[in-house]
Amino acid sequence: MRFRDEYRDGRAARTLADAIARTVTRPWTLMEVCGGQTHAIVRFGIDRLLPPDVSLVHGPGCPVCVTPVEYVDKAIAIAGRAGVILCSYGDMLRVPGSGGDLLAARSRGADVRAVYSPLDALEVARRNPRREVVFFAVGFETTAPANAMAAYRARQEGLGNLSLLVSHVLVPPAMRAILDAPDNRIQGFLAAGHVCTVMGYEEYLPLAAHYRVPIVVTGFEPLDILEGVYRCVRQLEAGRAEVENPYSRVVRRAGNRTALAVMGEVFRVIPRRWRGIGDIADSGLGLAHAYAAFDAENRFGPVALDREATGECISGRVLKGECKPTDCPAFGTRCTPEHPLGVTMVSAEGACAAYYRYRSIPARSS
Amino acid sequence: MCLAIPGRLLSMAGDDPLMRVGRVDFGGVVKQVSLAYVPEAVIGDHVLVHVGFAIGILDAAEAGRIFDHLREIDALDDREGRREIP
Amino acid sequence: MSRDDDFRLACPLPAGAGDTVQLAHGGGGRAMARLIDALIRPAFADAELDRRHDGALLALDGPAAFTTDSYVVRPLVFPGGDIGTLAVHGTVNDLAMCGARPRYLSVGLILEEGLPLAVLRRVVASMGAAATASGVRLVTGDTKVVERGKADGLFINTAGIGQVVAPAPVGPAGVEPGDAVILSGDIGRHGMAIMAAREGFGFETVIESDCAPLAEAVLALFAAGVTVHCLRDLTRGGLASALVEIAEAAGRAIGIDEAAIPVADHVLAACELLGLDPLQVANEGRFVAFVPGAEAERALGALRCHAPASGAVVIGAVKEGPAGEVTCRGALGVERIIDMLSGEQLPRIC
């Protein structure tokens, strides 16, 4: 596959890893924001190639992980109503609510369908005009244009039987919340390259300047991630705090204008509760007033957010980058993909699941 | 998050830019995707596809930069006598 | 089967020559006899079956292998085969994995009321053809009909008997450090074919299931005098699950090389699009064989003469290490631990 295979070259990866090792003179702690980057790091063993002075902390970059439990419960409740078809991205089907997940609801007779694209949900609505179709619209900014188009087209076509249950989150406010935390130890960021494909990277300039942290727009292949780490530590060693974009093969500074325009029409910025983190102002997207008729919370009742429950699961601290999955006493014993205690183990992109699936063996003499 | 895959645009259909669709070859699998968000795409372009939507066009010139950088690093290795051991 | 249908009391009297399965077809009376005689028996074309007795009388020489499996795949028909093809090849392959020549199969059919007879006709024809291709006989069977909604159209159980040809027992207990791990061909076709067909992902490129009979290829290994320590066909959970199961049962460690594992371009592309790991995707016509390292070349030579195993390659070896651990060396040269699939495989956006 062109534009993918060449970024997985082993020799090139080791060249970059060596360059990183030669550059660092002291410990640095970086955060990769996106769950897809966490997945790639653990799958390809990129953290095993880095010098011990460079720590990669995994951020809250999994929209599935940060979706509040009440939204999952709402989706399950809606799915359980007679005649409703609930369409959802596959990742969401195994996220635990307070009493089971959407897959469990399906086994009890609810019509829950995994879709690859929001366009598939539109098609389900067109083909089932007498049934209520609800699309569980989660994601970061990367997925917002696609989710927006479902609402945009539904309104254009007058598709009255489709509504969206929206739980969208934005990355920069989460980064700000992490940097504002009094015990923050993150010194540099690998920004989410596909979020930036949509949004551009203008909004990171004030962040880098205000908090004095380098922010490097980073892709998802091994060479992209190593390049991102290299640029970040090079800045840190030189005392710089700038925004860099080595993922320029797809990210432009201004982002995707058409996507931003449609998002601007369909969504508005609202406060959001982040599972495991808490409420962050202006950190999410909800449907704009013109699209209120397509809001599942208007058709089926609003989602009531309770106080966060606590338990053994430390996924919130993992999501904030305060600790690694392996720091959790339940990791791999009481908490596994078979019996997850929290979302970071359930979601394929969750840091805990990635660690569990792809954990590297300890270094051995060969 | 944001699983997006590059593919080559084989053909396009549709007059309204927001409704335009295209057939994209992902190195062996061909699938129709929405081209609503890449109105400037032309046949032969490589597009980045996320959940059935092309969200960006890949720039071949920019794509090569990382390899220029690697050549610089390799050259630095040579000059300083530090060759990477394969 | 559509779940929108209104509830109807099923009339036990056949309404006439309909084109769907009725409850009467399972009643043991004339309707059932007609279904079996007109539709099922001709497709299987077996003298033992035609004796119409409660069971089949068979003769076996020496030790026998015995296996059973049930098939509940949805959709019933998919690119590269149907539930009938799976039901015959699956059980034939299980017998082959025991080091046996497959000989006889029984067939249990559970039909859902409302199943189109055309589908049933196609499935039993596939079973007959698959049996002929594998040299096995379908010698006894049973048919039941359940009410609408109680079965996904059609469920099949097949049990099989085979004649053991392996000189020594074949199984995880025989696996030893130094054994070569041979994979018979490229992985991931069946699971991706089913997923594409079921979820309607709209791939223009058709991905065909790799459903195939493996007995001939396996028997060729024994005929070539290869010492076969263990065999396992890959099914749900893919290559990863098969290797982990063997490693755990054998109490051994296995190391494989990602670069050596063949995946067809279009299957890999589909996996990448949906965020799936090819190592965990289901297969239906692939197996792994564990043979002493020194015999690997001879084993490959024997396998590659048979179409379903023409792509056989060595993908790794049994090594010293913690019992049950399976590691894979990736593109960057770093080893990672391979796990079994956990739950249902779902596409992801993340």
Image (cartoon, rainbow, N blue to C red):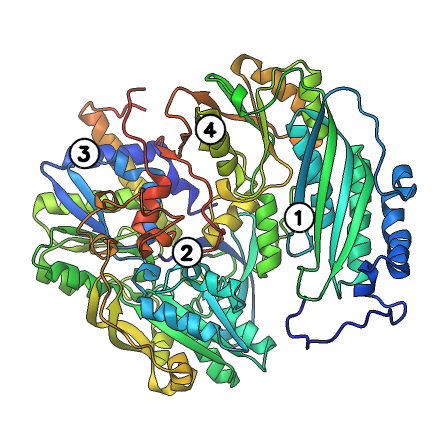
Query: Hey, what amino acid is under mark 4?
Result: Ala
Mark 4 — on which chain does it sit? C
Q: Quadrant of residue C145?
A: bottom right
Q: Quadrant of the N terminus of chain C?
A: bottom right
Is disc 1 surrounded by few (<14), some (14 to 19) or many (20+) residues within 10 Å? some
Q: Distance from label 4 to label 3 (Cα)? A: 37 Å
Q: Earlier in the sequence, mark 1 or mark 4?
A: 1
Residue A304: x %, y % from top left: 30, 77
Residue A131: x %, y % from top left: 56, 80
**Residue carrying label 3:** A21
Q: Quadrant of the C terminus of chain C?
A: bottom left
Question: Total marks drawn?
Answer: 4
Q: Distance from label 4 to label 2 (Cα)? A: 35 Å
Same chain for the residues under marks 1 and 2 in the image? no
Residue at x 66%, y 46% (from the top left corner): C70
- Horizontal side of residue A19 vs A44, given as left or right: left
Query: Hey, what amino acid is under mark 3?
Result: Ala
Same chain for the residues under marks 1 and 4 in the image? yes
Query: Hey, what amino acid is under mark 2?
Result: Ala
> Which of the numbered marks, if any, corresponds to residue C247?
4
Mark 2 — on which chain does it sit? B
Disc 4 on helix, strand or loop? helix
Q: Quadrant of residue C69?
A: top right
Residue at x 39%, y 51% (from the top left corner): B60
> Which of the numbered marks, if any, corresponds to residue C71?
1
- Whether tag 2 and tag 3 are in contact, CB under 8 A, the answer is no
Q: Distance from label 2 to label 3 (Cα)? A: 30 Å
> Which of the numbered marks, if any, corresponds to residue A188?
none
Residue C213: x %, y % from top left: 71, 35
Residue at x 9%, y 62% (from the top left corner): A210
Q: Nearer the viewer, residue C18 or C285?
A: C18
Q: Nearer the viewer, mark 4 or mark 3?
A: 4
